[in-house]
Amino acid sequence: MFAKAFRVKSNTAIKGSDRRKLRADVTAAFPALGTDQVSELVPGKEEFNTVKLYAHRGDAVTVYVSGGNPILFELEKNLYPTVYTLWSYPDLLPTFTTWPLVLEKLVGGADLMLPGLVVPPAGLPQVQRGDLCAIALVGNRAPVAIGVAAMSTAEMLTSGLKGRGFSVLHTYQDHLWRSGDKSSPPSIAPLALDPLDLSEEKGSVQADPTLQGDMRRLTLEGEEEESGEVQQMYEEKSLSEASEDPSPGGLNPDPTDSRTLQEQMDELLQRCFLQALKCRVKKADLPLLTSTFLGSHMFSCCPEGRQLDIKKSSYRKLSKFLQQMQQEHIIQVKELSKGVESIVAVDWKHPRKGSILEGAEVRAIIISYAKKNDLVDADNKNLVKLDPVLCDCILEKNEQHTVMKLPWDSLLTRCLEKLQPAYQVTFPGQEPIVKKGKICPIDITLAQRASNKKVTVVRNLEAYGLDPCLVAAILQQRCQASTTVTPAPGAKDSLQVQIQGNQVHHLSWLLLEEYQLPRKYVQGLEKAPRPGKKK
């Protein structure tokens, strides 16, 4: 309404009777305000003016100005607060959240479309069609716009968060705001999450379902490389794939993607489904209405610039898709009341699929993604702006509305910290062996037996593909000493080799020179006897 300059008809000091009437109107329009707050908003003695003006489209508007700032405006006998007022009373109206990049469009006169909404963990505020609402940006609860809801919350969810959500009346930086002192929005922290929710969240699910592993590759041919594992959960996108999302209006096929639009939508549907289960839903939420799961959880996991449209997938209907997920034993769906389905159980330990990616490639993917999506801060090249994909990847639930940027080193470190350890061993002429978990070094220790004789004990040979019995036979011959192979204490299905005397020198030659193991994977070599000292 105030995107363009308006024409002022009159500007007069308000009368005492009109001031009292305005207080009564404010009390009726905004019952959440107490008597003291109404008196603060419409003071009894301070300068207070009534400005009558015509908006650029001809609408007759009455604006109430206090202390030089417009605080209220009246249109067709309805009172509306300005952003100046909402900054003092941020909870006056139900508040919806959008992304900072959307603000420019709103200031230019655009309405707020539903795909631009950010759905918080607690879901959208409950409003009816025609309700007055505030609009804030991610990370700051200070409203930057007000508008009228074009549909109820239930209708928004039913529509799949598509279409026009709010008719915007006034914004920060529009001409009505410019008529005041032109101050910027204060920094108002988002409402804190329930500590119980945070503890339950950490106990059940962690942030990113697309990155899973930091491993070291060990080759027995003298090579040593650092590598990483990126494990893709079913059809969820890795960061590299996400960087090639279509631009806003992403229902159009990606020209670099050979898949059909339907295949791309199937992939997006499954990605949002899995990410919603891992990052949004807690055990305490169950049973959960399938409609609520879609509207409050799945849609919020859709990357910016993409639209999740089940009708354009091969499933056509949510119920059919959830049936497929039930057949894969990921969830259990039941009809708890006639015609209404709910998710009643989730297999949080359902096995995941994935592939290996070197650590250097993980870093390259993250850097490429940030650059392709223009996330590098223009004022400080050392900072990276966090979009929805990165937020879901690396931020905890309580950070997602407060942390907007991270330094490069922190971003890369956080990504790698989300990875589960694994390792790969490669033998000449054989396929690489990949195992989950951290690889333990070969452990060489010296022990004193009852006869006061020393023995050399070697553990963890199996992790490097070495047969303890074969190693024992080789050492027995070379050292001319007795050897035994016994179960390793505290280790399941693992053997240890014992050799009479201090045989660390022979072990060092065998492991480092003949088997070409990197020295960093063998601990205890310093226990070798010094020259001239008896074993």
Image (cartoon, rainbow, N blue to C red):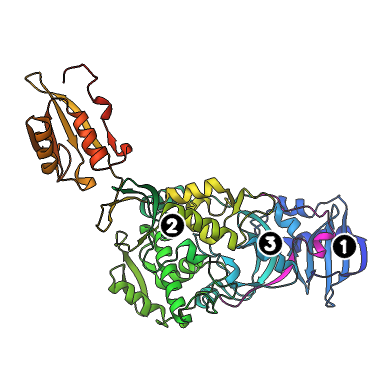
Query: Which residue occupies the foreground of this view, 83 or 39?
Result: 83
Query: Which residue occupies the foreground of this view, 88 or 21?
Result: 88
Q: For the point 36% across and 67% down, which residue is it?
A: 234
- Left or right of 175 on screen, residue 528: left
**Badge 1 or badge 2: first in the primary sequence:** 1
Q: Tell me the distance, in whole angstroms, between the alpha carbons under discs 1 and 2.
A: 53 Å
Q: Position of residue 42 (x, y in %)?
A: 79, 55
- Which SS class for mark 1? strand
**Badge 2 or badge 3: first in the primary sequence:** 3
Snapshot quadrant of residue 230: bottom left
**Badge 3 or badge 1: first in the primary sequence:** 3
- Which SS class for mark 2? loop
Q: Tell me the distance, in whole angstroms, between the alpha carbons under discs 3 and 1.
A: 20 Å
Q: Position of residue 194 (x, y in %)?
A: 47, 50
Q: From what the image shows, is residue 506 above or below residue 398? A: above
**Amino acid type for the residue under numbered disc 3:** Phe
Q: Which residue is mark 3?
A: 30
Q: Residue 208: which numbered mark, if any? A: 2
Q: Magenta stretch?
A: 162-187
**Amino acid type for the residue under numbered disc 2:** Asp
Q: Is residue 166 magenta?
A: yes
Q: For the point 43% across and 52% down, which residue is it?
A: 359
- Which SS class for mark 3? loop
**Amino acid type for the residue under numbered disc 1:** Thr
- Left or right of 332 on screen, residue 28: right
Q: Residue 50: which numbered mark, if any? A: 1
Q: Is residue 468 magenta?
A: no
Q: For the point 58% across and 67% down, which residue is it?
A: 117
